[in-house]
């Protein structure tokens, strides 16, 4: 075959605009000529803002979402074909994953909480969306509030045996103290590990335990102190004493002054302190007041205000070995089936029974000058 000259090939190229694609071949080479017109591609500008979706919880934009939780962990997604420049929730910028996922924690106040989510793409297209979360706090009872924030502590002291032969031993204070301790554990919001039970304690042991309580008890906690044993009232000094197991009849060095206890009540930073003594205590510290009603709102008010209350078997110089005071106290605590029982209600429930069955006249009131603000110690029944 003869060669096609370069001139012929050039002629073919120049005339190819009117012909379909053709292939020219020679013995050594071939040339394909495409006669299709050139297509010009134009870029379409991005004028669409990003798309925002709230995934969890599923919140529909522009609507109200109802929550009973104070905090919500929100998960969302934002997409745009040009890419995202930034995303914010209530003006706080949030980091996005490669797939456009973002997370944020919403802290809510009771009622309507308004939120705005803003996203901008790299072409400065902006999207703003709005939603409302209606937060309704769960109803919290006084029982739940106390159980969550407060610890009930107990210092239970019972003294039967005395080292001084001139001080008569007793048979029942330790038994009474143990029974009260068990009643508090079984029926009320006292845990065994938070009750110190002192049997035949010396003055030093009592002091050490009060020191420990003053360091451990916080301003939301409650403290019950119970003492059963010999007590002495000194009319000349206008002061009462507990007699620890190492007390000496003739020397007061190991006697425990009621005034010393009052000093500790000032130091112990409890919400409520209730002192119950089956022994004499200075009547001058008491300030009587009227009782509140039985409604839960009244109990809530009583619990809200700090208190320092005391109830005693009276101001006798000697304690009956078989105490009607402690017997009826424990009996009323065991029989109570109400969720809340104030110390004043407790005292009122057994006072007459003690008077009718003994020679003592129990006393109840505020302990003055130790921080009482009109509240009351509330026994919280176990459910």
Image (cartoon, rainbow, N blue to C red):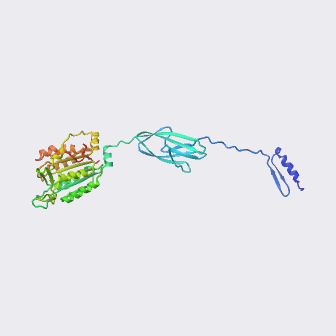
Name the quadrant of the N terminus.
bottom right
The percent coordinates of residue 228 (x first, y second) are 17, 53
Q: Is residue 192 visible?
A: no
Name the residue at 14% across, 51% down.
Answer: 239
The percent coordinates of residue 322 (x first, y second) are 13, 52
| Frontmost residue, 126 versus 139 | 126
Q: Is residue 129 left or right of residue 140?
A: right
Which quarter of the picture shows residue 230?
bottom left
Above or below for 87 versus 162: above
Q: Is residue 116 visible?
A: yes
| Frontmost residue, 247 versus 67 | 247
Which quarter of the picture shows residue 375?
top left
Q: Is residue 44 left or right of residue 151?
A: right
Q: Is residue 360 left or right of residue 294?
A: left
The percent coordinates of residue 171 (x first, y second) are 13, 56
Q: Of all residues shown, which one is farthest toward the left?
A: 166
| Frontmost residue, 315 versus 351 | 315
Name the residue at 21% across, 43% down.
Answer: 344
Q: How many marks?
A: 0
């Amino acid at each position: 075959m003869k060669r096609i000259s370069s001139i012929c090939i050039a002629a073919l190229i120049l005339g190819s605009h009117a012909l379909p694609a053709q292939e020219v071949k020679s013995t050594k080479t071939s040339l394909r000529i495409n006669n299709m017109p050139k297509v010009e591609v134009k870029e379409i500008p991005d004028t669409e803002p990003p798309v925002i979706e709230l995934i969890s919880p599923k919140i529909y934009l522009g609507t109200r979402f109802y929550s009973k939780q104070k905090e919500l962990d929100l998960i969302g997604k934002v997409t745009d074909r040009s890419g995202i420049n930034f995303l914010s929730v209530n003006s706080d910028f949030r980091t996005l994953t490669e797939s456009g996922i973002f997370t944020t924690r919403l802290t809510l106040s009771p009622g309507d909480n308004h939120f705005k989510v803003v996203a901008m793409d790299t072409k400065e297209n902006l999207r703003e969306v709005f939603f409302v979360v209606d937060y309704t706090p769960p109803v919290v009872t006084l029982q739940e509030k106390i159980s969550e924030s407060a610890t009930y502590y107990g210092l239970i002291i019972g003294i039967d045996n005395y080292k001084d032969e001139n001080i008569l031993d007793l048979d029942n204070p330790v038994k009474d103290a143990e029974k009260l301790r068990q009643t508090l554990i079984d029926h009320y919001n006292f845990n065994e590990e938070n009750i110190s039970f002192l049997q035949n304690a010396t003055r030093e042991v009592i002091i050490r335990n009060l020191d420990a309580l003053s360091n451990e008890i916080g301003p939301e906690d409650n403290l019950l102190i119970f003492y059963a044993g010999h007590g002495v009232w000194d009319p000349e000094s206008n002061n009462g004493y507990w007699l620890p197991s190492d007390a000496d009849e003739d020397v007061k060095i190991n006697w425990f002054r009621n005034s010393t206890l009052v000093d500790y009540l000032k130091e112990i930073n409890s919400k409520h302190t209730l002192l119950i003594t089956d022994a004499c205590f200075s009547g001058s510290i008491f300030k009587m007041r009227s009782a509140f009603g039985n409604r839960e709102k009244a109990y809530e008010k009583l619990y809200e205000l700090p208190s320092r209350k005391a109830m005693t078997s009276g101001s006798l110089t000697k304690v009956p070995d078989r105490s009607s005071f402690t017997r009826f106290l424990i009996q009323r605590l065991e029989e109570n089936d109400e969720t809340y029982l104030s110390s004043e209600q407790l005292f009122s429930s057994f006072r007459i029974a003690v008077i009718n069955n003994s020679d003592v006249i129990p006393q109840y009131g505020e302990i003055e000058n130790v921080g009482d603000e009109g509240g009351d110690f509330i026994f919280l029944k176990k459910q």
